[in-house]
Amino acid sequence: MPLPPALSRPLTLPVVGSPLFIASGPDLVVAQCRSGVIGSFPALNARPASLLSDWLDRITEKNASYAAAHPDAVVAPFAVNQIVHRSNDRLEHDMEVIVRHRVPLVITSLGARPEINEAVRSYGGIVLHDVTTDEFARKAVDKGADGIIAVAAGAGGHGYAVTLRARPGDPGVVRRPAADVRCHRPRPRDPRGPWPPARTSRTSGRPSCRPSRPTYRRPTSR
């Protein structure tokens, strides 16, 4: 099966730069693309909503001008992360802007929406969907996603943990049992010991990445 046109050009590394809340914007995306990796940003970072069109124009123009001035350079495509949950009141507006600008890759999160996938594919773009379990991965593919992004346990506080199997013959994405989930977030150091213990969520019973509140000893007065 050939790669879609959006990914047919070579990359320096097969990497997608994470769409970072607040931090990712046109300058970072352009720098990533010029380095030969796919740059991305969340659509909701562009505030107000009218700024999204300006950001896409800047990224497209800067990448095109750099590619024209450096014909031997690898300039990667870019992606926009779109929250497709129905609570996103900007979804319709942002998707109209994305389709009008023919964004090469769209990363969807918080819901698999066939109509979103069809809108992106209407102009030749592709959709990668964030998933946290093998069940959600299968649902995303069934609803028309072109690929999946396996969100690991330490990524942005998502509720489940997935890991990629590296051994031949194993399924690609599996759900890790709760007992095997380890927190990746740094924990504050307790003066009384090396690290405070991790807590267990009262609602789900799974280990929580929030450490128990450390209690500090008061200095002894002399």
Image: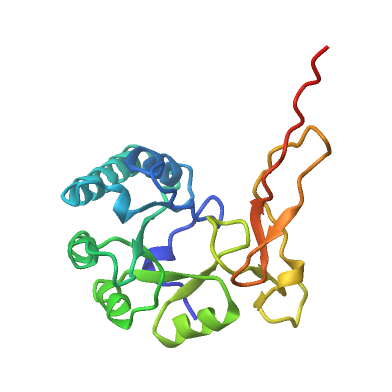
Which image quarter: residue 171?
bottom right
Where's residue 156, x and y in %? 53, 55
In the image, residue 51 above or below residue 125: above
Left or right of residue 178: residue 32: left
Question: How many numbered marks, from 0 up?
Answer: 0
In the image, residue 142 above or below residue 119: below
Which image quarter: residue 194?
top right
Where's residue 185, x and y in %? 64, 48
Look at the image and name its color scheme.
rainbow
- In front of the other: 142 or 126: 142
In the image, residue 211 above or below residue 102: above
Asked if one can make out residue 173 in the rendered structure from this viewpoint, the answer is yes
Return the residue found at the far front: 222
Asked if one can make out residue 166 in the rendered structure from this viewpoint, the answer is no
- In front of the other: 105 or 185: 185
- Residue at 40% over, 40% down: 28
Return the residue found at the far bottom: 142
The quarter of the image holding the C terminus is top right
- In front of the other: 137 or 188: 188
Left or right of residue 222: residue 116: left
Where's residue 94, x and y in %? 22, 61
Return the residue found at the far top: 222
Which image quarter: residue 150?
bottom right
Left or right of residue 145: residue 188: right
Where's residue 132, x and y in %? 55, 71
- In front of the other: 160 or 53: 160
- Residue at 76% over, 70% down: 179
